[in-house]
Image (tube, rainbow, N blue to C red):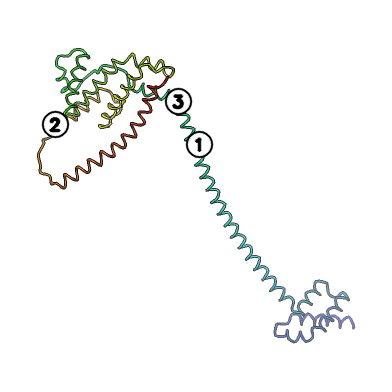
Amino acid sequence: MERICKILLVLIVGFFISLSPITSSYLKADTVQDIKEITELYKEGLLTKEEFSKAKAKILGIEKQSEKEQKAKNKLKAKEKKKRIKEEARKAKLKAKEDERKAKLKAKSQTKKKLTKTKVSSSQSDPLTVIDHVKALGTFKEPSSYPEGMKETFGNCKTFYCIQSKATKKMGKIFSRTSVYYDRHPGAQLYGMAFFEVFYLQKLKKEKSKIEEFIANWPDKNKHAKSIVALLKTNKSRKKMREALGMDLNTSVEEAMERFWLMGDFLEQGEVKKKKVSKDIKKRGALLAKYKKSVGSFNSAIKKLEDKKLYDKIEKKK
């Protein structure tokens, strides 16, 4: 009978534990008694340690409190985790920026080293550079053909010596003309450029042995340095003339002369007409011409300085 009473007591305690919050105020009044009862049940072995702890927490209202604490802890942990992730992202971003800055500095340093290396390498290979320039002068080869209009200047010439002699005289005459003459004969300068090709070939023919000796002795000796420099300057003028019509030094002499002559014929077909020009336009034209001349002079000065270095290397090499 006593055992049955104890079982009933356990059931009653379980009932009270599972009661809703409405009855919680009643439980609080008998909290001490309830704890005593479940303690006795635990001592007698009718409740396990886990069941006893849960019942006790229920009676004291600790369970809800612990749940709230746990939620608060979880919320705090989530907040801290979010903060930590944010901080890690910030650090990663700063690190990426620092790495980028270091990479740029490294690249800049490497570029500077390469430029220095290139400069040193360039200065070390100066003799080769000089030889390249000299070889770019080309070799003499008599033209296989001439423009039809150009042949009229040569008359009955049968030898290249005769041809170049008349071409040189004609070229000199054309290039000594004034701007007024060029206004009346816009194709004249193009004809002069065609004759210049023949003039240059004669120079190559005349200085052939000097060129060969210079190449054979450089860099130990600078034989015929002045003649080589003079040829380089003449070739530079030839290059500029060709570039005016989109050609380079690789263009054959025959093709270069033909192009110059055809363009000269085309320009000569134009009719010169006089028109009255206002003073303002004349002033603008003069200012524009002055500006172009200044820019051209500046660029030319830079190029001349580079050429001068090359010429000095050739003439002063010992």
Quadrant of the rendered structure where residue 195 is?
A: top left
Label 2, label 3: how far apart the Cα atoms are: 47 Å
Assign a secondary structure to mark 1: helix
Quadrant of the rendered structure where residue 41 is?
A: bottom right
Assign a secondary structure to mark 3: loop
Amino acid, disc 3: Ser
Assess disc 3: are there few (<14), some (14-19) or many (≥20) residues with their C-alpha within 10 Å of its C-alpha. Answer: few
Residue lying at 18% horizontally and 27% vertically, measured from the top left = 176
Amino acid, disc 1: Lys
Residue lying at 27% horizontally and 18% vertically, measured from the top left = 203
Amino acid, disc 2: Tyr
Assign a secondary structure to mark 2: helix
Assign the C terminus to one quadrant of the image. Answer: top left
Please name the residue that numbered disc 3 is placed on.
Answer: 125
* 1 or 2: tag closer to the N-terminus: 1
Residue lying at 18% horizontally and 45% vertically, measured from the top left = 283
Quadrant of the rendered structure where residue 189 is?
A: top left
Q: Position of residue 146 (x, y in %)?
A: 20, 20
Which residue is farthest right? 2
Label 1, label 2: how far apart the Cα atoms are: 55 Å
Q: Looking at the rendered structure, which numbered label has been put on residue 165?
A: none
Please name the residue that numbered disc 2 is placed on.
Answer: 181
Q: Position of residue 252 (x, y in %)?
A: 28, 23
Q: Is residue 185 above or below residue 209?
A: below
Q: Is residue 221 above or below residue 291?
A: above
41, 26: nearer the viewer:
26
Please name the residue that numbered disc 1 is placed on.
Answer: 113
* 3 or 1: tag closer to the N-terminus: 1
Q: Position of residue 163 (x, y in %)?
A: 20, 16
- Relative side of 147 to 94, left or right: left
Assign the N terminus to one quadrant of the image. Answer: bottom right
